[in-house]
Image (cartoon, rainbow, N blue to C red):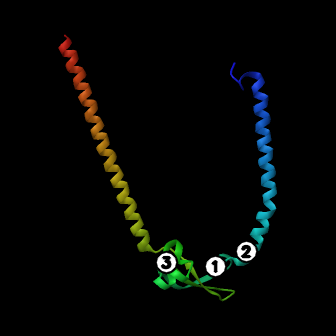
Amino acid sequence: MPAGSGRHGLPQGRHLCWLLCAFTLKLCQAEAPVQEEKLSASTSNLPCWLVEEFVVTAECSPCSTFQAKTTPECGPTGYVEKITCSSSKKIEFKSCRSALMEQHLFWKFEGAVVFVALIFACLVIIRQRQLDRKALEKVRKQIESI
């Protein structure tokens, strides 16, 4: 009988499973208070538009070269909008997605899908021809054997 199989191997596996579960649970409980402290400390660093109402003062526009280097909000999309928070009256920049950028991304995706579809269509045609040749060869051999 292989090692770990049968009745003798099963309880050891169960003990190991429970040991791993208990260790994971203790690890998660040990990290939980630290995460809560970090969360409460970081709420003061949140941008005002996440916490309160805001008004868009400048529509979504591409970042200038200067803004791209100095404004961290330009990083994710390359577009920003200027907003004013209602209660604190802070003026901040917020990363946004422009309609033109979304349209370009959509057509790139569509092009990629069509390209992949054409590749797979060609593969299907090639495979079908191979199968047809094999079937014709099989029929030819059967006719010759008669």
Query: Pointer 1: what residue?
Result: 49
Q: Is residue 19 left or right of residue 144?
A: right
Instruction: Check if mark 1's residue and mark 2's residue have beta carbons within 8 Å.
Output: no
What is the x, y in percent for residue 86? 65, 86
Q: What residue sits 55% from the left and 83% below the top? A: 70
* Rendered image quadrant of residue 14: top right
SS at mark 2 in the image: helix
Q: Is residue 91 left or right of residue 137?
A: right
Query: Which one is earlier in the sequence, the residue at label 1 or at label 3?
Result: 1
Quarter occupied by the N terminus: top right
Name the amino acid, label 3.
Answer: Tyr
What is the x, y in percent for residue 102? 44, 69
Q: Residues within 10 Å of mark 1 (few under 14, many from 20)?
A: some
Residue that protrudes farthest toward the bottom in the picture: 89
* Rendered image quadrant of residue 34: bottom right
Q: Residues within 10 Å of mark 2 (few under 14, many from 20)?
A: few
Question: Does residue 139 appear in this view?
Answer: yes
Alpha carbon distance from label 2 to label 3: 25 Å
Quarter occupied by the C terminus: top left
Name the amino acid, label 2.
Answer: Thr
Query: Which one is earlier in the sequence, the residue at label 1 or at label 2?
Result: 2
Query: Pointer 2: what residue?
Result: 43
Query: Which one is earlier in the sequence, the residue at label 2 or at label 3?
Result: 2
SS at mark 1 in the image: helix
Vertical placement of residue 113 versus 139, above or below: below
Alpha carbon distance from label 1 to label 2: 12 Å
Name the amino acid, label 1.
Answer: Trp
Residue 85, label in figure? none
Q: What residue sits 66% from the left and 89% below the top? A: 89
What is the x, y in percent for residue 64? 46, 84
Q: Can you tell which of label 1 and label 2 is closer to the viewer?
A: 2
Query: Pointer 3: what residue?
Result: 79
